[in-house]
């Protein structure tokens, strides 16, 4: 029996700070995440270590909290990908704006009513950007949905035609969609 995954993402952005882009709107976030929360019982959320407010927003719901440091090779690759110049990058970091971080905080736990409310209603940070870098929703240990890069890219795993129709109905009209079928 074949299964389908769908990768989809936002294509229109606005700049909220030098080099920091966010979707023009996050109107899709609540219906999209609510849909997959109803199919999930566990979560894993990843934030950059310096995003203390974002980490603290999820900490009360986490059963597991881990901090991972990036190795030197990854540090180099990440900094190259995140900034076109070290100068701009360092200025952003000094100003406390989104820039390079030295590691990730990983928070995991069971989904409950309070966690759902946090994820759905307190999702944006002070810049108007989704406050969590990476959100995984799981059915036990199986990931069924991921939100990546502050809610600009998504993957839904093992989706039905009904799931795809719903996803397309809540995403912005200009969103990109790629559906993969596998055995």
Image (cartoon, rainbow, N blue to C red):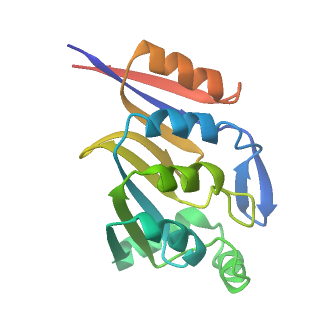
In this rendering, position of residue 6 left or right of residue 18: left
Residue 77 shows in the view: no
Figure quadrant of residue 146: top left
Figure quadrant of residue 30: top right
Image coordinates of residue 117 in percent, x first then y, are: 56, 51
Residue 67, placed above or below residue 147: below
Figure quadrant of residue 170: top right
Residue 152, placed above or below residue 157: below
Image quarter hosting the N terminus: top left
Most foreground residue, 27 or 17: 27
In this rendering, position of residue 44 left or right of residue 115: left
Residue 103, placed above or below residue 28: below
Residue 160 shows in the view: yes
Image quarter hosting the C terminus: top left
Most foreground residue, 63 or 112: 112
User: Residue shown at 35%/61% (left/top)?
Assistant: 108
Residue 9, placed above or below residue 44: above
Number of marks in picture = 0
Residue at the outermost front position: 113
User: Residue shown at 60%/34% (left/top)?
Assistant: 31
Image coordinates of residue 115 in percent, x first then y, are: 48, 55
User: Residue shown at 42%/72% (left/top)?
Assistant: 105
Image coordinates of residue 171 in percent, x first then y, are: 64, 29
User: Residue shown at 32%/67% (left/top)?
Assistant: 63
Image coordinates of residue 87 in percent, x first then y, are: 69, 80
């Amino acid at each position: 029996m074949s299964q389908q995954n769908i990768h989809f993402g936002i294509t229109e952005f606005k700049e909220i700070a030098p080099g920091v882009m966010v979707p023009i709107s996050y109107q899709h976030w609540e219906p999209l995440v609510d849909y997959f929360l109803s199919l999930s019982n566990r979560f894993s959320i990843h934030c950059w270590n310096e995003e203390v407010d974002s980490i603290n927003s999820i900490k009360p719901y986490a059963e597991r909290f881990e901090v991972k440091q990036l190795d030197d090779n990854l540090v180099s690759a990440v900094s190259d990908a995140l900034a076109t110049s070290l100068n701009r990058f360092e200025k952003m970091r000094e100003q406390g704006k989104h820039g390079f971080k030295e590691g990730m905080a990983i928070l995991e736990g069971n989904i409950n009513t309070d966690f759902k409310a946090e994820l759905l209603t307190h999702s944006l940070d002070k810049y108007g950007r989704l406050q969590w870098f990476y959100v995984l929703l799981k059915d036990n240990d199986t990931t069924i949905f991921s939100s990546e890069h502050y809610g600009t890219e998504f993957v839904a795993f093992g989706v039905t035609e009904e799931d795809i129709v719903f996803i397309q109905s809540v995403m912005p009209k200009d969103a990109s969609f790629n559906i993969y079928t596998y055995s």
